[in-house]
Image: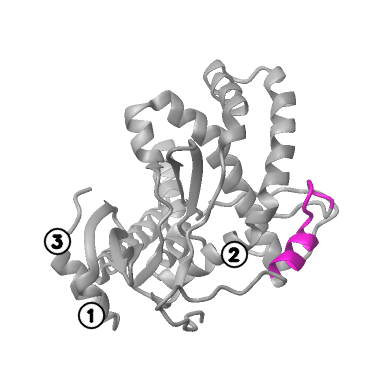
């Protein structure tokens, strides 16, 4: 979608008490329904600014209320035909997504998720190696041709891929604005538009397993316990990931953009899962190095 004018972004910065960033604002890098991202030059550093817009949050609130009223009306009518049941299921799904969708407007939560991902990132190479071993076995079990071809290509090219997580600047994180380091590279969105086969290969072979692993660790590390019955319950992940190929090495960087807390029953797994059981993930997260401010930018506590 088209980006909003810089004046609107600067208005958000003033509202968030970050007036000092207005003169450092660069061009828009991307824009979406919830947020907009700009380049930012500060103290000689090339950074990224992400902002959300209050009126967008109000529109979402209104939409969810309308869906809620429609769901109540449909329930009161007690219709029992197939189409009515389909519509009711759609309304119910929208209602269940409300909490996670509205959480995207609080960038403190996103910054916290980025720190969690960064703390867990050193474990990723071992986890990814195990995933590729499982992939090799799975390719012989009759996957759809398109998926199998993309995954085979991903397995061959994966040696050059790397993951990196942008770091939030603690003193410049508020509910409606966040400054973070810039990963650079070519975005996955651009790659899918210009080279769809390469994009599919990266998405299936790197982004999907990384997102799934973050979902597991983000849920399990907060609970700090495994479940011996190895039962899985899927929930809608709120991790959003972009990937970029960094010149000249051709490596890939991934940027987790947001996360919300899972329900207690969201993900359950055996404590012997993979290379990194939940208990080990919890210990590693607690022992992680604490982030510091960037040069010229003092640290500030922004967590709730």
Residue tagged by mark 1? 14
* Contact, mark 2 vs mark 3 (Cβ under 8 Å): no
Q: Tell me: 75 left or right of 129.
A: left
SS at badge 2: helix
Q: CA distance from mark 2 to mark 3?
A: 32 Å
| First in residue order: circle 2 vs circle 3 | 3
SS at badge 1: helix
Residue tagged by mark 2? 116
Taking 211 as reference, is 98 above or below it?
below
Which residues are drawn in magenta? 272-285
Rendered residue at 61%/24% (across/down):
156
User: Is 165 covered by the magenta stretch?
Assistant: no
Q: CA distance from mark 2 to mark 1?
A: 28 Å
- Nearer to me, 45 or 81: 45
User: Is 282 covered by the magenta stretch?
Assistant: yes
Q: Is residue 260 visible?
A: no
Q: Is residue 219 visible?
A: yes
Q: In which image quadrant can residue 19 be found?
A: bottom left
Q: Residues within 10 Å of mark 1 (few under 14, many from 20)?
A: few
Q: Position of residue 105 (x, y in %)?
A: 37, 67
Rendered residue at 85%/54% (across/down):
228
Q: CA distance from mark 3 to mark 1?
A: 15 Å
| First in residue order: circle 2 vs circle 1 | 1
Q: Residues within 10 Å of mark 3 (few under 14, many from 20)?
A: few
Q: Which mark is residue 143?
A: none
Rendered residue at 42%/54% (across/down):
94
SS at badge 3: loop
* Contact, mark 2 vs mark 1 (Cβ under 8 Å): no
Q: Tell me: 84 left or right of 231.
A: left
Taking 123 as reference, is 294 above or below it?
below
Q: Which mark is residue 5?
A: 3
């Amino acid at each position: 979608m088209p980006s909003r004018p810089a004046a609107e972004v600067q208005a958000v910065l003033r509202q968030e008490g970050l007036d000092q960033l207005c003169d450092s604002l660069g061009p828009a890098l991307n824009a979406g329904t919830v947020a907009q991202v700009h380049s930012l030059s500060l103290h000689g550093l090339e950074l990224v600014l992400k902002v959300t817009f209050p009126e967008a949050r109000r529109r979402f609130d209104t939409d969810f209320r309308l869906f809620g009223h429609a769901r109540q009306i449909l329930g009161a009518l007690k219709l029992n035909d197939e189409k009515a049941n389909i519509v009711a299921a759609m309304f119910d799904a929208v209602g269940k997504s409300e909490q996670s969708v509205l959480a995207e407007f609080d960038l403190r939560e996103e910054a916290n998720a980025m720190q969690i991902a960064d703390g867990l990132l050193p474990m990723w190479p071992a986890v990814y190696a195990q995933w590729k071993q499982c992939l090799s076995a799975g390719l012989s079990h009759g996957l759809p041709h398109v998926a199998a071809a993309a995954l085979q290509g991903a397995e061959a090219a994966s040696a050059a891929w790397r993951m990196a997580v942008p770091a939030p600047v603690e003193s410049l994180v508020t509910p409606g604005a966040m400054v973070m380091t810039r990963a650079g590279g070519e975005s996955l969105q651009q790659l899918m538009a210009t080279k769809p086969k390469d994009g599919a290969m990266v998405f299936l072979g790197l982004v999907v397993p990384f997102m799934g692993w973050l979902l597991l660790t983000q849920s399990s590390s907060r609970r700090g316990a495994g479940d011996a019955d190895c039962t899985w319950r899927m929930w809608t992940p709120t991790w959003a990931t972009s990937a970029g190929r960094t010149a000249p090495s051709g490596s890939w960087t991934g940027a987790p953009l947001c996360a919300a807390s899972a329900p207690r029953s969201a993900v359950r797994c055996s404590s012997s899962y993979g290379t990194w059981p939940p208990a080990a993930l919890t210990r590693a997260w607690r022992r992680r190095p604490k982030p510091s401010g960037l040069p010229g930018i003092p640290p500030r506590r922004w967590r709730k």
